[in-house]
Image (cartoon, coloured by chain):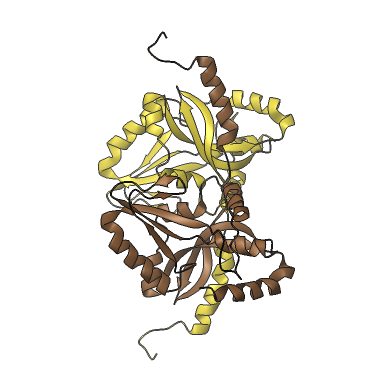
Chain colours: A brown, B yellow
Amino acid sequence: MGYDGRVITEKGLEELRNALVTDRIGFIITKIESLIFKANFDVRQGKGNVIINNAVISKRHYNTALKIIRKVVSAGYAVSPLVRIFEEGEVVEGRIVPKGKVMIVTLCSITLDAILHHAGIPISPMFGGMVQILERKPLRFTDLISYSGSTLDPLEIFSAKGLSSVLKAVETGNGYVLANFREIPMTLWPRLRRSLKGLKSLV
Amino acid sequence: MGYDGRVITEKGLEELRNALVTDRIGFIITKIESLIFKANFDVRQGKGNVIINNAVISKRHYNTALKIIRKVVSAGYAVSPLVRIFEEGEVVEGRIVPKGKVMIVTLCSITLDAILHHAGIPISPMFGGMVQILERKPLRFTDLISYSGSTLDPLEIFSAKGLSSVLKAVETGNGYVLANFREIPMTLWPRLRRSLKGLKSLV
């Protein structure tokens, strides 16, 4: 190609294709488990790494978003009331917040799995799903997608499809919210209850 | 309540709730398998029940929809070129086509599983997913959702989320289409190839 540039040959393209085939399909459970193992929040000392969710939104939606978050937290539907805001230009985990945007960081519920895992309770996230709320009480799971059988995050699917109605649940006491379905060995049930009680003092 | 009406008591409501809890969660694989067992299309005689997809659309979109279907069929992305239209008021499997609408019925790819199953080849639909098309050839699965781990149809999820680009694949030869991932015992591979050859004569 002289000095004009480089091309990928047909053989190189083929190589690239084959290399990608096996890499691309990674079920979401692998990502979640590696986050669980990496987090090291210590409940007694009140410090360590937690797992977060981040949302990048337009600045002009910032006030509305914060009002909604406050409403959801007050109603008891959030894992933690802690919220952190990053302004445009700030760098979070190697990602820069774009111009005209803010990043809203909240605690991810998988942090709970991490804390319990490190406390010696083997906990497995099984399904992401939707729970029907009736008269302010969780009634039942209405839909489930397995974490070990999906390459997409089930909760992202349920949010994106517009099947949930979190705000309606918060405001009227009736609606559909996102929830995780977890599994622990049955013999550890008393120990889990004690651990969860300990966690409540943190919120 | 006198003659004014009836109310469901709290106890009755509770009963109703409990009754529904176990009924509601049915993984999609159960529905698919029951369809496979019910279909009885005989390839040699060219008759029997097949499994269908139906789409109810507004009459004013009818011509555009038909043009798109023709394009997809011609490009070889449909299971079968057979299409059947039901007008408003017609009854299909106990459902009436609403006013101002038409129902477009096409062959569902699960019919293939049914035909192979009845030919003695145990075939299991494992995942619904997305396949990347590059230069008019299927390259790789890029996302998968397990049929046995989801209460929602994976292919409906992939269509609804707008992750696929079937028309782009048809028109430019590059895009993402919906596809199923199936499993058969490896020893039946030669027999499957023979069966598929036989099916080609039908299209």
Q: Position of residue B141 (x, y in %)?
A: 54, 34
A67 horizontally vs A42: left or right:
left
* Front residue of A38 and B155: A38
Q: Position of residue A170 (x, y in %)?
A: 39, 71
> Which residue is depicted at the point 53% across and 26% down?
B202
The answer, for residue B48, to whether it is visible in the render is: no
Q: How many marks?
A: 0
* Front residue of A112 and B54: A112
Above or below, B88 relative to A190: above
Residue B85, by quadrant, is: top left
* Front residue of B45 and A15: A15
> Which residue is depicted at the point 60% across and 24% down?
B198
In the rendered image, the quadrant that contains the N terminus of chain B is bottom left
Above or below, B150 relative to A169: above
Above or below, A71 relative to B133: below
The answer, for residue A172, to whether it is visible in the render is: yes
> Which residue is depicted at the point 50% across and 65% down?
A131
Q: Position of residue B145 (x, y in %)?
A: 55, 45
Residue lying at the far top of the rendered structure:
A2
Residue lying at the far bottom of the rendered structure:
B2
Residue A73, by quadrant, is: bottom left
B61 horizontally vs B13: left or right:
left
Q: Position of residue B137 (x, y in %)?
A: 49, 23
> Which residue is depicted at the point 41% across and 52% down?
A160
